Image (tube, rainbow, N blue to C red):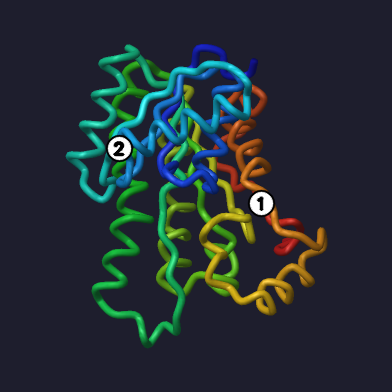
Amino acid sequence: MLLKDKVCIVAGASSLRSIGYATAELFIKHGAHVVVTDVMMNDDVLNQIKFEIEKNLGVTIKIDGIQCDISKKSKCDRLIAQVQSKYGTIDCLVNSAGIVRSGPILDISEAELSLMFDINLKGAFYLCQSVLEVFVKQESGTIVNVASLAAQRGGGLVGGAHYAASKGGMLSLTKSIAREFGHLGIRANAICPAMIDTPMVDGLSPERLQSITDAIPLKRMGSTREMAGTCLYLASELSGFVTGATIDVNGGTHIH
């Protein structure tokens, strides 16, 4: 078990088709104590997540769920305090919470831009800031930020310029954390996925989806389990000498 008894927070896990859910399931399989958080989290959502994981793994599990609006720093502080109070430590944060919107740059309103940055960038910043308070004191911890191919190529595929900019900021944030806190044994890495089979691709027409997958060297979309595997690698000691890195999980869409 790669994460035996590690305490891991997974943000953005309310949908059973999400990267966050798949990551929570895989982390539990590898022995982690998992806390899932989402603005939509409640008892019903948590019970559904627990039921699905138990069905898939064939065992009874323990999992915590905490509602959190990550766009508010005070809510992120409270989330981290609750987890630390229960477990005494936190070993890993996986930040896979986010929203996506498309559209031409000249059509993006001030309200749309604020919403995108509040969740995708400020939310990531606040979560990292809050958990780093714990990591600094214990001189250990790992952060995995789920960004996007859009950050590398300037939008396209699904998200617009505001989405790309928010995810680009996440990449810079990740590198800054790695550089500033590496001497304490704290690691931070980012993942740039593309065309993963999540609800984010549901708005694409079959024709558009086919044209995109035809252009992918592996000729298919990626799975949330494949993304979870990358999160597991970055959260575990398998990647003990990896920090400040951006890992591409895109089927070869962006080879650079």
Name the quarter where the C terminus is drawn.
bottom right
Q: Where is residue 94 in the image (x, y as percent from the top left)?
A: 47, 37
Q: What element carries label 2?
A: loop
Name the residue carrying label 2: 42
Q: Are marks 2 and 1 in contact (CB under 8 Å)?
A: no
Residue with the most extreme bottom position: 106
Amino acid carrying mark 2 in the image:
Asn
- Identified at 59% across, 61% down, the residue is 149
Q: Is mark 1 on a helix, strand or loop?
A: strand
Let me know if residue 175 appears in the view.
no
Name the residue carrying label 1: 248
Which quadrant of the figure has residue 64? top left
- Identified at 67% across, 74% down, the residue is 206
Q: Nearer the viewer, residue 168 or 231?
A: 231
Amino acid carrying mark 1 in the image:
Asp
Residues packed near mark 1 inside 10 Å, few (<14), some (14 to 19) or many (20 plus): many
